[in-house]
Image (tube, helix red, strand yellow):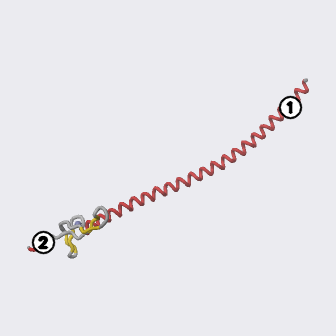
Amino acid sequence: MADELVKHTCCGYKWDGSSEWITCHKTAKYNWAGKWYCGIHDPVKVKAREKKRNEKWEEKYSEQKRIREIERVEREKNNRIKKAMEHFCERLTLEFMETHKAFEWIKLKIWRKGSDNGNDKD
Ligand SMILES: [Zn+2]
């Protein structure tokens, strides 16, 4: 009976909001191993909150990891495409230059033939 009249206060710690951890001192509701805790600092609830926080963090972390992996694969794919494009452009340029050279050569031939014919006609 007497014990019920005694107001126990929480022995949990809380952040004072600026520089240090101070004892909670709220009216305690739970007794764990001889220590009293309020609704906020009840070790069971604290543990549950921590677990939830860890799970959330892990979820977030694994999500970030997943995104990073997608980005990495995407980057590799883009690099491969870029390399292939460069290679293709190089070949295309070379082929174009070859074709251009051949075309110029043919043009020169025709022009010479044309001017030869012209000379013949004159
Ligand atoms: Zn407390």
Q: Is residue 109 above or below residue 40?
A: above
User: SS for tag 2?
Assistant: loop
Q: Is residue 87 left or right of residue 119?
A: left
- Mark 2–mark 1 CB contact (< 8 Å): no
Residue 31 position, x and y percent, is: 19, 72
**What residue is drawn where x is 52% and y is 56%?**
72
Quarter of the image holding residue 113? top right
User: SS for tag 1?
Assistant: helix
Looking at the rendered structure, the kind of residue marked 1 is Lys
Which residue carries the number 1 mark? Answer: 113
Query: Residue 17 got which mark?
Result: none
Furthest residue to the left? 1
Q: Is residue 65 left or right of residue 87?
A: left
Quadrant for ligand 1 reads: bottom left
**What residue is drawn where x is 17% and y is 66%?**
27
Q: Is residue 92 left or right of residue 41?
A: right
**What residue is drawn where x is 90% and y is 24%?**
121
Which residue carries the number 2 mark? Answer: 6
Q: If you read the primary sequence from the N terminus, does the residue marked by circle 2 or circle 1 appear first?
A: 2
Q: Is mark 2 within 8 Å of ligand 1?
A: no
Q: Nearer the viewer, residue 63 or 37?
A: 37
Residue 42 position, x and y percent, is: 23, 68
Furthest residue to the front? 19
Q: Is residue 81 above or below residue 40?
A: above
Furthest residue to the bottom? 34
Q: Nearer the viewer, residue 16 or 114?
A: 16
